[in-house]
Image (tube, rainbow, N blue to C red):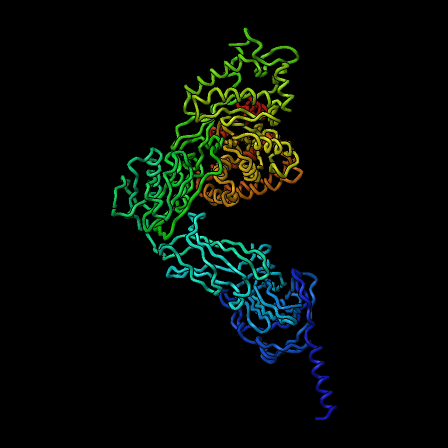
Amino acid sequence: MSKKFIFLLLLSLTAVVIASAQPQPIRFEKWIQTWELCGPFPLNVEKEPLNDSVHIPGFETDFLSAHGGEHKFQFKPGQTETFGGGSYQWIKHTSADSLINLDETISKSPLKVAYGYCVLESPKEQICVLSAGTNDGARLWLNGEQIFDSPKARGVKPDDDMLVVRLKKGENTLLLKVEERGGSWGFCARVLPLNTQKYGDRFALFRVQSDDDGKAKLKFLHQPKLAKAVMRELTLQLYRAIEPDKAIWEKEWTQNPQMILELPTAQYQNYILKMTGHLIDGSEYDTMIPFAGGKRMEHVLFASGESDYQIALAPDASESEKWAAEELQHWIKEISGAELPIVIFKEKMSQPHIMVGFRKDIPGFFGFSSPRPDANDEAYTYGNVGRNIYIWGGQARGTMYGVMSFLENELGCRWYTPQVSFVPKKERFVFDFLYHHEEPALRVRNDFYYEAFEPIWAARNKINGAMNYREQPGGVESYWAVHTFYPLMPPEEFFPTHPEYYSMLEGKRTWERAQLCLTNPDVLKIMIERVKKTMREKPEYLIYSVSQNDWRNPCQCDNCQAIAQKEGSESGPLIWFVNQVAEAVAGDFPDKFIGTLAYQYTRKPCKNLRPRDNVVIRLCSIECCFAHDFHSCPENAYFIADLEGWAAIAPHLYIWDYVVNFSHYIQPYPNFPVLKPNIIAFRDNKAIGIMEQAAYQSRGGEFAELRAYVISKLLWNPEKEVDPIINDFMVGYYGRSGQFVRQYYDLLHGRVTPETHIHLGLEPDDKLFSDEFVRQAERIFKQAEVVADNEAIRQRVEVAWLPILYLKCRRMPEEAKTDGTYTRFNKIVEREGITHYAEAGAPHREAFHQRMRGMH
């Protein structure tokens, strides 16, 4: 071979190397923006296939076969691929951002395939994460090895697919094949460090998979050969979901890509696998994988109007448990037509049954031990062992709430209002595994809407609080009275002979719109006697109020002011006084509380005094902005400071919150978005109870039915998502009209901006409203009325419409009177028995009508 030939050959080989794709250094977390692209290659279909569980026909064709094929692809810049008589040249493309837009660079036509190719240069051999997103299905090769395949139709989502890979030192080739089903197409990709703490919420290393035989396997989700390379060590702990703090076993991972997990029983149930260890780089790995394992066995509760089941009660069942059993019987019959007999439980019952109430052997059926719940424990559990279903909790309300939740969660019952329930009709109900446990976020839950006072509705929706005691299944946690200074020490009884018992204002004792002198020892003595008398005569209450009158003017005498100044707040004399009352009653009434207000002039916490253990501080949010939650609005900063201050010193907080416009009950009031975050703020600051004060004297408050229902759900569990609750109500309560009522709801709440502030005295002429808003809302409600399923729903739509009718009467009275708005308003309020348009009642109502009658 001549030297000249060898030289030319070497030159040729050098040219090939130089002409290959330019290697790009790996930059963690930076998007790969430069790619070689080729396409569009046609697919052998005329329209998009409906099934995206497989690739489009023709995708499997290797369009790169002329240059080594997809597995051994050899690339030269500018080279051309040929297929079906056509030629397709590779082009270099650099994107300005993360997305490689194939609409712009390849083709806007659907049912095509394109390739992307690049070379990544790694400074060392390393384990990392290759992250990609594609539209639509795709296949990916790293250094000629296929590492990913998905036919799924989807949009481009960054980091949609996160793959653990091993990069070799030097050049690493990346080939991506993307199919287009329709619409737009493209892809994005980048390399991330293997950091489960930073990216663990977006990708997983492992999954537990259960097969039809009930076996559970721990699977490494990435290339099997990398399983040993990723983890330095890994410890596994298996827990039952019902006992998340008690490990069944602890084992080391076998480093196999698939590892069989030993389950304690063949019965199908929920588990948690806790995994702790270190990745190959030494970083910590800590995760939990919930899964279900065991042999599935289906059980039929009812079918075709018949059931083999009985409802079993313990011999010592409480009254609320008996009522709950009757509720269960009633609603299952409504749903299925099958009537389950209620029986007293006997050992070795041959028929399948739903056990309502606790038995000492039940926890053992589920693999754990537990004593009988306290009678007042409101937590509940329901689940099945084989074909039998068990529902239990505290005898007062826990079991009852378990039954109602079983009906709601599993069978789909809803109790929207005292008059309107939703009962799905089911031909058959089949279950294999049931297990659910809940406990309330708050001890006392007082939904203070007129609609929520109905005892059966309240029991079904887990409302247990009341201002005044009422008979209700399971009983209520009631709070005796408020603003009790004068009811307990009436001025007409004491002031003529003992003016020193009342406030000193401007050097003179007075009782008119005043308070008590809290440092007078005789006042304390009389108060203790009268509170004890009230507690003996009204033993059904949980909390007894010793609280200021509903106005200001605390006593300004030297003794009262000395405490107020020392404590930095008028709450000082009040807590000093209430603590002594609480101490005096504690011996005779150890399970009761004395409550008082942190309200207006007493809202600021004391500096040094601390409420006693049997004192409940009732903090009021009356001054707040309710357009925004407490934490996000500057107007609420002082209230949050007071809330946190009381939480730091008070053993018990009971919140008096406000969810209504006192000045205009019926007027639109867009405060739904603050309900959840505000209740969470109360819960997080040690509140034992919340009263959501609303329109309480009659029906007709703006969205009263919806708000009462949403509040009931949030008081039990403040973490619930509100939108699904609202949407469920819209469909269940308003039927086909619900879509338009929801449209109005969104229109109203869309008017709130960061600059909007609403309070309890929101007026019709506020800038929040406009005449155009009223007209838009009218058009929406007219649509809602047209599609109403029946007359009952049409009337519900009218009640939802009422706030707009009222607002129009107030903003455009002459037009409202001439176009029939005022007449329609009157017909609705008369039909619905709405007597209070505002808290003021008759005076406000009469002034409203007098104004409207004065219009020509």
Left or right? Give the position of 792 relative to 100: left
The number of discs equals: 0
The picture places residue 381, in percent across and down from the top left corner, at 40, 43
Left or right? Give the position of 221 relative to 406: right
Q: Is residue 756 visible?
A: yes
Between residues 774 and 181, which one lies in front from this camera angle? 181
Between residues 547 and 82, which one lies in front from this camera angle? 547
Which quadrant, please, contains the N terminus? bottom right
Left or right? Give the position of 402 relative to 528: left
As drawn, which residue projects farthest toward the bottom?
1
The picture places residue 531, in percent across and down from the top left corner, at 47, 18
Q: Is residue 855 visible?
A: no
Left or right? Give the position of 127 relative to 218: right
The picture places residue 573, in percent across and down from the top left corner, at 59, 20
The picture places residue 696, in percent across and down from the top left corner, at 50, 28
Q: Residue at x 43, y 51 (%)?
A: 247
Residue 292 placement: quadrant? bottom left
